[in-house]
Image (tube, grey):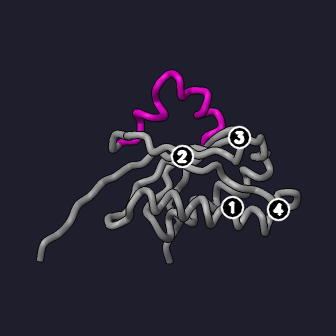
Amino acid sequence: MPHTYSQITAHLVFSTKERRRLMTDVLRRRLYPYLAALINNDFGFARAIGGTRDHIHLLADVRTGVCVSDLVRSVKSISSGWIRRNVPRQRGFAWQGGGADLETPPTGAGCFGCPRARRLRAGLRLMRPLARA
């Protein structure tokens, strides 16, 4: 039986609608673990999540058979619904249309290790694998 090996590490970037500065510290503390669980359960493994008041960065290993555009579309749709339902004062929350999928080396170090990304790393949370029963 043939086997398939694939290692796609995606650095995804998307912003709030109209680049509104809606991503408060409280929202990010709640949203990042939710995004990590969503990605880990359905699409692969969330390595790191970070961002600012108006956009987020996701570094994720994408599971074989998952299309990156489907990953982005699903994560944005599901997370915006979750924010509207669960975060007071965010009933009209939406992500900007589009986004970016930046080419990333398998180690993932390239996108977060360069000098211009050092400011991002200050707010970056590395995601740990969940313990399995």
Could you give the CA–CA distance between mark 2 and mark 3, rounded to whole angstroms?
Answer: 12 Å
Image coordinates of residue 131 in percent, x first then y, are 52, 68
Q: Amino acid at mark 2?
A: Gly
Quarter placement of the N terminus:
bottom left
- Residue in the image at 68% along x and 61% along y: 80
Residue matched to label 4: 91
Circle 2 SS class: loop
In the drawing, what numbered circle is on residue 19? 3
**Residue extending furthest left?**
1
Q: Earlier in the sequence, mark 2 or mark 3?
A: 3
Labelled pair 2, 3 in contact (Cβ < 8 Å): no
Name the residue located 51 percent from the left edge and 63 percent from the top edge. Answer: 39
N-terminal of the pair, mark 3 or mark 4, is 3
Which residues lie in the magenta part? 107-124
Q: How many marks?
A: 4
- Which residue: 45% across, 34% down? 111
Q: Earlier in the sequence, mark 4 or mark 1?
A: 1
How many residues crowd around disc 3 within 10 Å: few (fewer than 14), some, or many (20 or more)? few
Q: Is residue 120 left or right of residue 59?
A: right
Identify residue type, mark 3: Arg
| Residues tagged 4 and 1 counted as in contact (Cβ below 8 A) | no
**What kind of residue is marked 1?**
Ser
Residue 1: image tag = none
**Does 19 sit above or below residue 66?**
above
Q: Which residue is mark 1?
A: 80
Residue holding disc 2 = 99
Q: Quadrant of residue 101?
A: top left
Element on which disc 4 rests: loop
Task: Give how far apart the Cα atoms at labels 1 and 3 are.
Answer: 14 Å
Observer-nearest residue: 83 or 60?
83
Label 4, label 1: how far apart the Cα atoms are: 9 Å
* Disc 1 crowd, CA 10 A, few/some/many (<14, 14-19, 20+): many
